[in-house]
Image (cartoon, rainbow, N blue to C red):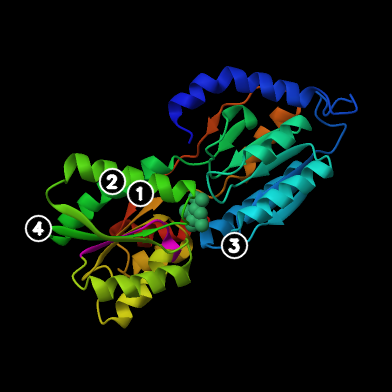
Amino acid sequence: MLNRRNFLTAAVGVAATAGLAACAKEDGSPTGSSSGGSKTITLGFSQVGSESGWRTANTDSVKSAAKEAGYKLQFSDAQQKQENQISAIRSFIAQKVDVIAFSPVVVTGWDAVLKEAQTAKIPVVLTDRSVESDESLFVALVGSDFTDEGRRAAKILEKVLEKAGHKGKVKIAQLEGTTGAAPAIERAKGFKEVMDAEHKDDWEIVASQTGDFTRAGGKQVMAAFLQSNPDIDVLFAHNDDMGLGAIQAIEAAGKKPGKDILIVTVDGVKDGFIAMSEGKINAIVECNPLLGPQLMEVVKTVHEGGTVERWIKTKESDFMQDQAKDALPTRKY
Ligand code: GYE
């Protein structure tokens, strides 16, 4: 798993790897030009799937930024299956693309295919999600700090509880993202970190299960939570879509989302903001999907043999319900 310290300590090795990978291809020909214009860059991109509003916005951002940059994009949708991503990466290697970028569906199981890319001297850039792999196998990650998003969710929940006048014990249900995916592992970790440090006696996670980052998953799992734990006070959903599905289940159970059950989600997609402006979500921790332009910059630098930062992050904010109406018209995704 990537963390800030690893990124810093690995920076030198990575710069060397990126330089090596970008200097020459198997046939010995240079892969790029320092003037940056003579050869079109071919980028192989393996996307997770189309599980959420966040993902749709991310795909659009990658496609439009590649177009804008004038790259040839080989885009492949893995439908949330690791085996599809591995095949896509193998096919990018066979096609001898210049750079491979991918958003790994889960954190483990990548070493073999990433070694194949390294042997073929094709640099790999991770986008959105990280992996638990030998860090020399990829040059950089363009994406958010999910552990911090989990911490931010816990901190904003403090404000939500205060605003709602909730006193005493807090029974929390957690809808986790895809099992084994970096944002699911790290958001849960960050949230728990704050909970254990500051709310050991009053907060309790009474139910926690994956809803696979989808609306249907959120709805189904929340319905089951409500059956086994009718007295849930708070829902922490790892993304808006699961929160939106859960809202349907809460309403079907005759309860008021945002009042009877306070809801904090992550992402900040338009539908999430709409639900928040209707009072059904209490707070959203933003996770920015518009990673395309930054990714294309990294691809260019890496292709030209330059040095890139190990972890390129995007600026993000948190939003409470009373900010939703004002923020809605300016939301870009
Ligand atoms: O939060 C969720 C999506 O990896 C950050 O994946 C991304 C997550 C995002 O399905 O909506």
Q: Is mark 3 within 8 Å of ligand 1?
A: no
Near-viewer residue (177 or 250): 177
The residue carrying pointer 2 sits among few (fewer than 14), some (14 to 19) or many (20 or more) residues within 10 Å by Cα, namely many
Question: Residue 167's mark?
Answer: 4
C-alpha separation, residue under disc 3 versus residue under disc 4: 39 Å
Where is residue 166 shown, x and y percent of the image?
13, 60
Disc 2 marks which amino acid? Answer: Lys
Q: Is residue 188 above or below residue 14?
A: below
The residue carrying pointer 4 sits among few (fewer than 14), some (14 to 19) or many (20 or more) residues within 10 Å by Cα, namely few
Q: Is residue 14 magenta?
A: no
C-alpha separation, residue under disc 3 versus residue under disc 2: 28 Å
Side (left or right) of 132 relative to 124: left
Q: Is residue 240 magenta?
A: yes
Disc 1 marks which amino acid? Answer: Ala
Q: Which residue is mark 3?
A: 50
Q: Which is nearer the N-term, disc 3 or disc 4? A: 3
Disc 4 marks which amino acid? Answer: Lys
Q: Which is nearer the N-term, disc 1 or disc 3? A: 3
Q: Residue 247: tell me if it is visible.
A: yes
Near-viewer residue (302 or 293): 302
Side (left or right) of 84 relative to 202: right
Give the number of the mark in front: 3 or 2.
2
Callouts 2 and 1 close, C-beta under 8 Å: yes
Question: Residue 192's mark?
Answer: 2
Disc 3 marks which amino acid? Answer: Ser
Which stretch did the figure color magenta? Answer: 233-241
